[in-house]
Each structure stands twice: as structure tokens, then as C-alpha cells.
Image (spheres, rainbow, N blue to C red):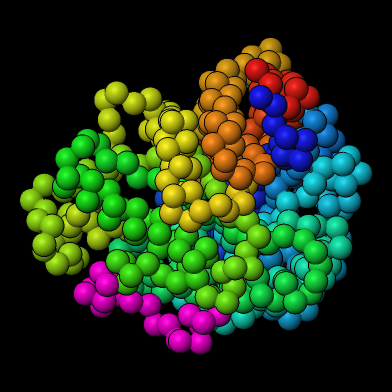
Amino acid sequence: MKFAHDFLFGAATASYQIEGAWDQDGKGPTNWDEFTKIPGKTFEGTNGDVAIDHYNRYQEDIALMAEMGLESYRFSISWARILPTGTGEINQKGIDFYNNIINECLKYGIVPFVTLYHWDLPLPLERKGAWLNRETGEAYLNFAQICFEAFGDRVKNFITFNETFVFCNLGYLAGAHPPGIQNDPKKYFQAIHNVFYTHAQTVIAYKKLNQFGEIGLSHVFSPAFSVDDSEENHFATEHANQFNLNWFYDPILLGKYPEYVVKQLTTEGNVPDWTEAELAVIAEAAPLNDFMGLNYYQPMRVEKIQGYVKEHVITRENSTGSPGNPSYDGVYRTVKMADKKYTKWDWEISSQGFIDGLDNLKALYGDIKLYITENGLGDEDSIIEGEVCDIPRIRYIEEHLSAVKTAISRGIHIKGYYAWSAIDLLSWLNGYKKQYGFIYVDHKNNLKREKKASFHWYKSVITNRGED
Ligand code: BGP
């Protein structure tokens, strides 16, 4: 089977991970510009000050993407390039930069797919409480509207937020992302709600503009599966899915938060401070979403925590899980299994988990339009005599594209696939050690770009529209 002619073969990046030029041409500082300078927060002190200098080399990079045959390029906009303090005066050079990127894509017939927020928040907003402060949401709405006005004539696909689960989880539970807070579920759930309310307002505002484009959001997609058939592990898995999947997908797709989780949060005293008016906006926006973006890397394997009794009220006091786990872990933990394959960073490799997860998603939410907005293999690539032979990456993407094909043949509406990443870039917590790109960036040789084996492979996949 070939992929349909309107299926988009793409690849993705994000502003902080590639642009560099952190203070060039009027850009303001962001939470990540600050966070990566705190000792011990990132891998060997790496940061995105220069990144891969895409800001100054975007023409060369997009020309390479065009040579690879890319049909669509997902990139994000750095809010602080357009509004250096998050609000107030527009920085025209920021608008110019993204106009250049968009026009360069269009020159080659590449569809620009724009993420408005991929985690780099203007520093003044971070200082005022980031997503816990409702002013951040108001500022975001203004920023989004500036972007719609400036780019919406040519950009027809907008993603409001990338992976709310990840930046809130790592920001308020694990402390590994800004603002670096550990184990504060009250803040975690509040930040998520504030983001979802802002998303809903943004979708409604976009639709009022009649730009005839599409808008949605990208979620991390890590479906949970029980380690075995026991009833207790199945229950623990359902609990994990409720907290990590339904809590995120329900408000966007169904317009309301899942009752199971709300009940648990009520017991805990962690229900977000929300108003009826905000909940009504979330409900109003749900049917207006045009698509859902899924970032799939791996599933979760779940087992109950020893000593757990189903009837117990789950509280932080009887929690034994890791702080990075948002699960109220008197119930479950995620485990590594002896019979599964893993990357060097212990991320499970499972295209079957992808297919099964997509089936479950369809059972839960019905026929929704999906884009796979991220999927790929992080590896330590090396360049030997100008060649980067990234065969494991080719295998990974091949298997996952094949899973997408299977899902489509089962009636799941997947309209495009974006490999992570178009080009090597900064990994948030692993610096430049962990690579994902089709294009190698040589940090020992003036950031020189080299095509990897996967570059040529992906080009032929696109040319043949994925036919085996
Ligand atoms: C996703 C993010 C991406 C990217 C990817 C790989 O969660 O949206 O920005 O970083 O994960 O992550 P890592 O670099 O940690 O392996």
C-alpha cells in the first residue's frame, strides 16, 4: 500500500533546540536561556545560545530539507523573538525571520506546520509565575493573534502547545524543566488547566478570523499497557491512562475533564482553581479543534505498587513512586521489561505499542483527524570519513511508518508523519550527545551539515510514497 497523495511526509524541530542567536536582532531572554545556565541543570552545561545556528543558516537547512523531498516542515516560533518581553512592542526582526522561514519553505513547495509554543517562555512571564499566573495565558493569546495576523495567510496549520504533559510534569513534579519545582501536584494540575483554558481561547479566536486553516495541539502519546493479565495490574494501568492520557485528551476532544481523575484530585485537595466560565470555554472549543497531534516515542509498561489495595483512598502519604511520575503512585509504577527492546536511554522501542495505542485512542474518542507530529530515535551518531551510518534510526522509522500504514488500513485518520527531527539539534536534557536528525551537525567542524544514511533513505521513502 502506498500512502495517499495528500498524506504529508514531514520532519520537525523546535526553536530553542535549533535557532541559537539567543540575543540576536532584538530577541528577549527566555526561561530556557536562564534555566540552562543554572549549574547541573543540563547535560555537561550545554545550552541553546548557539544551538545549531539555524537562525543564521536557515536557508542552507531548508534547502537540504527540500533536497530530501520533505513535504512539510514542523517548526516552532520563539515568542521572545516576536515579543521580547512577552507583551508590548513587536520586534519586526522576529516577524521577518519567521516570514523568511515560511517563504523559504513555500519556495520549495514545503508545507509549513507551525507550533506556537514549544516551551521557550519569555523570561518576564516566567518570573511572574509562568503558567500558574493567568496573565501568561492572556499574553499568549495576544502573541498567538499576532502570529495569525502575520503568518496566517500562508500558514494553514497551527499547533497551539507542544506536550503540556511534559513541560508541566518536568516543570512542577520532576523539577527538570523550568521553573524547576519538585513534587508539587497542586501546581502541576493548575498549570495544565491554565494551558488548556488558553488553548481553548486561542482556538476560538483563530476560528473567528476565518483564515480557513486548521488548528490543534500536540500531545505526548505514551499509552500505558499492563505488564500482565492480572486484574490488579489492569486496574493500575487504567489509573495510569486516566491520569496521563484522559486527563490531557478529554478536555481537548470532549471538552471536559475525566470524572475519575477529578474525583481523585478532590480527595487529595488538588483540584485546580477553575471557574465555571473557564470550563465553559473549554467545552465550547472542543468541537472546533481540527486535529490532534501525537508525539509517539514509546509506550509505558505498568504494574501496581506492592501493598496497594484497590479500595484505599490514594493520597500522597501512601505514595511510593518517583517524583517525576504524575500518578499519585500509591497505585502504579512503570517498569522496564526483560523481553522488550530499549534505546541507549532506556526508551522502549515498540511499534506494536504504537498500533495498539492508536486502536485504543479510536475506541475512546472515535474518528478524529491525527498527525504524528513527532516520532524518532535518539542515538549517539558518529561521523566516519564524512559518513553517518544511522541504520538503527532507519529501522526505527521504517517500523513506525509501517505501524502508521497499518493504523490507516484500520480506518484511523492519520494525515501526516513528522519525524523527530529534521536535523540534529539540542536535546533538552541530553545536550548534543543524543541525536535524532536526518542531517548531521558537526560540532567539531564549525557546525557543518552532512547528510546521514537516513537522509537518503527517507528521500526514497517519500519518492515511493512509502511503498515497500
Ligand atoms: C519531545 C519534545 C521534543 C524532543 C523529543 C526528544 O518530548 O517535544 O522537543 O526533545 O521529546 O526528547 P529528548 O531530546 O529528551 O530525547
Q: Hey, which residue is sitting farthest right in the picture? A: 107
Magenta span includes 271: yes
Q: Nearer the viewer, residue 393 or 226?
A: 226
Q: Nearer the viewer, residue 250 or 51?
A: 250
Q: Quadrant of residue 349?
A: top left
Give the quadrant of the C terminus.
top right
Give the quadrant of the N terminus.
top right
Q: Is residue 206 above or below residue 334?
A: below
| Residue 435: image location, x then y, percent | 57, 33
Residue 101 falls left or right of residue 450: right
Q: Is residue 138 above or below residue 17?
A: below
| Residue 88: image location, x then y, percent | 73, 81
Residue 182 falls left or right of residue 47: left
| Residue drawn where x is 69% and y is 12% of the image | 385
| Residue drawn where x is 61% and y is 45% of the image | 413
| Residue drawn where x is 72% and y is 72% of the image | 207
Q: Which residues are magenta?
A: 263-281
Q: Nearer the viewer, residue 343 or 60?
A: 343
| Residue drawn where x is 57% and y is 27% of the image | 402
| Residue 436: image location, x then y, percent | 59, 33
Q: Nearer the viewer, residue 34 or 195?
A: 195
Q: Is residue 418 visible?
A: no
Helix, strand or loop: magenta stretch: helix
| Residue 343: image location, x then y, percent | 43, 28
Q: How many numbered marks have been drawn onto this rendered protein structure?
A: 0
Q: Is residue 109 above or below residue 437?
A: below
Q: Is residue 152 visible?
A: yes
Magenta span includes 273: yes
